[in-house]
Structure formats: C-alpha cells, structure tokens
Image (spheres, rainbow, N blue to C red):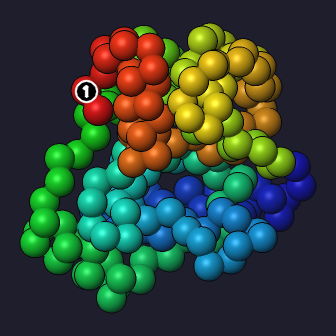
C-alpha cells in the first residue's frame, strides 16, 4: 500500500465517521464497472479498514447490513435530496430493521458478522473482486471463511473456502438473503430463521 492509498483510506474513514456522527444517510460507491450503483444507508461502525452500513433500499425499506472493506469504496457522498426521499419513504411505510448486534469498535467487522451469521443460521452474500457467493457460513477465522454456497433455488449447499483478505463486501439480512432463507427452509423443512 502506498502513501496515496493510505491517505485515501484515511479520508474515506473520516468521511464515514462524519456521516455516522450526523446520523445521515450515506451513499457508498464500490463498483468500478457500474459507477451508478451504490449502497445507501446509515453508517453504524467505522474503523480504518472496514465499515458497517445499515442498508436502506431505494424504496425506503430496511434492507439488512453491509460490511464493506474501505479499500473497495471509490466515493462516499451524502446526497441530501436522495436522503430526504428515503427518510420520507421510511416514515410513510415503516419497515422493521434487521436485528443484528454491532461489532465492537476494535473487532474485525467481517469476521464478527460471519460468525454471527453462522451462529444464527443466516444466509450471507460474500463478494470478492471477481465473484459473489450466497449461502450459509460454515466456518470463519482470521484467514478464511467457508461458505455453503446455495444454488439458484436455495438448495444443495456446496462448501467453498474464501480467503478473508479477498472478501471485499458482505451482505446479510437483505431481501435477497431472506429470499434464499425462505427457499432453503421450504426445501429442507428446516425453518429456524425469522425471515
């Protein structure tokens, strides 16, 4: 990592902390190939290398959490008009937030979230630079995570090991993950989640 990368990470963390302190809806741009795609939500935790964002869908609904590596964030903004619209939608049609404890300030946010998902049998989506995997967490430690990757219909988990250093983004509790939990419960008859 060169000095410019360090400065960019520090500026990203500073901006995220500002928005967290203001309880403002942040827009995080992370996808180089789709520059119009972004994650909107409330920043709930920030450290120098990771952030936890409580996601708000474009329709003003609570949509789980994203845990994002700061080095993958291209830009952080607060679009006042967009945030105002989301807040209005949240008031007009309230939705319950996804219940997940936040990691401690000094914890590894990604590992904490993966371990919580494993303990609570919740589906996660894990993104690397080249791919994404949806499934149940079978194991997570400092070096790697093992995900039981589900097929398109939410069946037949296949174990896939992913190096923790390669994980750029984790999503849990979103509408998509809850859909997979519903499908999995249907096919297995094992409904131990509150979907």
Viewer-proximal residue, 112 or 178? 178
Can residue 19 be seen?
no
Determine whether the residue tagged by mark 1 lies in a helix, strand or loop.
loop
Viewer-proximal residue, 164 or 61? 61
Can residue 58 be seen?
yes
Q: Position of residue 20 (x, y in %)?
A: 36, 58
Above or below, comparing residue 8 to residue 192 in the picture:
below
Write the residue at 38% across / 70% down: 58
Above or below, comparing residue 119 to residue 107 in the picture:
above
Q: Is residue 190 left or right of residue 97?
A: right
Q: Position of residue 118 (x, y in %)?
A: 49, 15
Q: Residue furthest right?
A: 2
Residue 26 occupies which quadrant of the picture? bottom left
Viewer-proximal residue, 15 or 44? 44
Residue at numbered disc 1: 194
Q: Position of residue 101 (x, y in %)?
A: 31, 29
Q: Position of residue 32 (x, y in %)?
A: 76, 69
Above or below, comparing residue 27 to residue 73 in the picture:
below
């Amino acid at each position: 990592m060169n000095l410019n990368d360090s400065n960019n990470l520090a500026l990203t963390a500073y901006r995220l902390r500002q928005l967290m302190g203001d309880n403002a809806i942040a827009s995080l741009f992370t996808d180089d190939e789709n520059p119009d795609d972004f994650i909107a939500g409330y920043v709930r935790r920030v450290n120098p290398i990771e952030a936890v964002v409580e996601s708000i869908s474009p329709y003003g609904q609570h949509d789980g959490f994203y845990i994002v590596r700061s080095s993958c964030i291209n830009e952080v903004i607060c679009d006042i008009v967009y945030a105002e619209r989301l807040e209005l939608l949240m008031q007009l049609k309230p939705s319950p937030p996804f219940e997940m404890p936040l990691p401690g300030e000094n914890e590894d946010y990604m590992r904490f979230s993966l371990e919580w998902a494993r303990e609570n049998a919740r589906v996660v989506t894990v993104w690397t630079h080249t791919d994404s995997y949806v499934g149940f967490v079978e194991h997570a430690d400092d070096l790697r995570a093992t995900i039981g990757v589900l097929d398109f219909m939410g069946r037949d988990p296949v174990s896939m090991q992913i190096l923790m250093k390669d994980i750029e983004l984790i999503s849990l509790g979103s509408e998509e993950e809850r859909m997979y939990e519903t499908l999995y419960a249907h096919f297995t008859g094992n409904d131990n989640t509150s979907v």
